[in-house]
Amino acid sequence: MWIKGLCVVAFIVLLNSCRAENPKVTTDCGGVVEGVEKDGAYSFRGIPFAKPPLGELRWQPPVSVTDCLEGVFNVYGEACYQSNFSKLDEHFGSEDCLFLNVWTPTTDSNASLPVMVWIHGGFNEFLSGNWPGYSPSEKLAKETDIVYVGMNYRLHAFGFMALDLISQSAPNRTSGNYGLMDQIEALRWVQKKISYFGGDPNKVTVFGQSSGGTDIYALLASKMAKGLFHKAWMSSASPVLNKTTAEASKDNLLFLSHTRCNTLACLKSLPAENITRAIPWYTFPNWKMMDLMTLPHKGEATGALPVVDGYVLTGEPRKVWSEYRNDVPVMIGTTAQEIEFDPADTDMPYWTWDKYHEEVSAKLSTFSTSLAKAALLFYPAGQISPAYQFLTMISDIRLTCPTEIITSAASLNFRSPIYRYVATAWPSKPTTVLGFSFPATYAFHCIDVLAFFDTLRNTINPLSHSDLLFQENVRNTMLSFVKDGKPSACWQQFDQMTALLSQHITFVSAYKNRECQFWLSNDFFKYGWVN
């Protein structure tokens, strides 16, 4: 029996000796950082990059963490405090949320791999830097041989509240854009620390989608972000970013009245739940922003989260670029049917062509009857489906055409190359996006980044041949841009060409030129997406 017991002990010792150790890296201070191995690569999760913005640090710029980086980082940090998008009275997360994650194919500090820093979308109000299906992964790091970083940043009222009451006590005499400052702080961390995880701090590409793209639009014009990144990929970014702190402060007085506070001390003492419940989601400034998911009505408005505060941003980015820009190569993308992930008109798939005419006429006649009739000539009945035409018209107004304006501004003012694409691929079957219930059939919002992450397969299983071809085109395009500075040998800069990304890549000299001239000449830029 003692021989049998000895053999068992020996087997356990042998098993433990063969078991791979958790990945470790050593930082500048001699601290050892331990992470997780998965899918042939490594992740280091929940690394704090700034002090918790609690108490007196609420509505203050982030404060750097100066302690030696060491410890076990195998669990993602809390998401920033937020509401459930579908049920705003349900809350989760924490104000103690300024964490980032590193996904890397190597722990060799001399590897000097390119780095991609992910800035997540979600209206600047929802989600996180490691949201399932909408973030980098160990598998992505392994397959692309790139080091990825994803960060949390403060959201909604905690990240973007502009109020005179806050500005009066601020050292810079302004307020708002705390979420942008968190992103800048995370980029500073990358410059200081990413080499220990195999990344090259001189090869950093920021990439973001939706409000993450909007934030990159702002970072390209911010002196605070100077030298922190070397390329940028902004997908489906909101083109309208021109509201000042003073203007937003007036818009946000309704929030202040909901809190029943008249001092900053009172505001800072409120529980996170009370702050979130005080947000005017469905009345002006409409922080739920559902009015942006259909055709505009004349004079309608939505409040802004990122603002021109005179500190992070000194002016509207496309106008500031003539004086100051973080002059790096930029890839600017949109999708052909942007709003399909969550349209306001949820019965759209069942419309007849008569219903389509009725809806377009009713909404655009608030501008003029002649404008509504002209719009129907550009988007006539009988093509594909009523839903397709309606989605395309809204997407052109809200994003496609305003994005042409900001891309032109970048092309005129940047010495670095500016590239433009429109994702036109349709999923092989209707799918839902990040939990939204609307069945996406066409080139929906975020189809491009989901293809890059290879997470379309989360809702389309198995992926069809056409899905795989689209994913391959997106990934090859972006990896070439990140690693070599150009998406492909035949892809020329804007405004010489725009690429249409689908199962095949084609090029056009001017995408939607006639439609965009119509909308922009009728002053529709101001009805582009905000946030």
Image: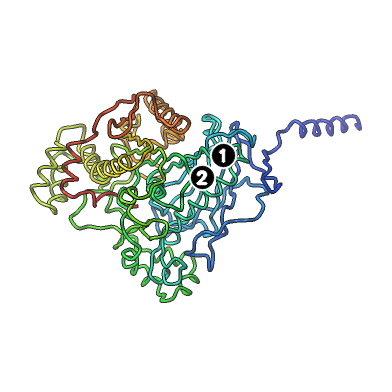
Kind of residue sitting beneath label 2: Gly
Residue 503, x across and y down, in percent: 35, 25
| Residue lying at 69% horizontally and 49% vertically, measured from the top left | 29
Q: Which mark is residue 150?
A: 2
Residue bearing the label numbered 1: 103
- Residue 38: x and y in percent read 60, 35
Measured as percent of width and height from the top left, residue 401 is found at 24, 42
Residue plotted at (81% across, 30% down): 11
Side of 337 where 369 appears, left or right = left
Question: Which one is nearer the viewer's eye here, 130 or 162?
Answer: 162
* The N terminus sits in image quarter: top right
The type of residue carrying mark 1 is Trp
One can see residue 516 in this view: yes
Q: Left or right: where does residue 474 sit relative to residue 81?
A: left
The quadrant where residue 4 appears: top right
Labels 2 and 1: the sequence-earlier one: 1
Question: Horizontal placement of 362 versus 7: left or right?
Answer: left
Label 2 to label 1: alpha-carbon separation: 9 Å
Towards the viewer: 94 or 184: 184
- Between residue 503 and residue 441, name the one nearer to us: 503
**Circles 2 and 1: CB atoms closer than 8 Å:** yes
Classify mark 2: helix, strand or loop.
strand
> Residue 371 placed where, x, y %?
11, 47
- Label count reads 2
Question: How has the structure been colored for display?
Answer: rainbow
- Circle on res. 472: none
Q: Nearer the viewer, residue 292 or 496?
A: 496
Judging from the image, what secondary structure is the residue with disc 1 in?
A: strand
Density class for disc 2 (Cα within 10 Å; few <14, some 14-19, many ≥20) is: many
Residue sitting at the far bottom:
262
* Residue sticking out furthest to the left: 370
**Figure check: 145 above or below 271:** above
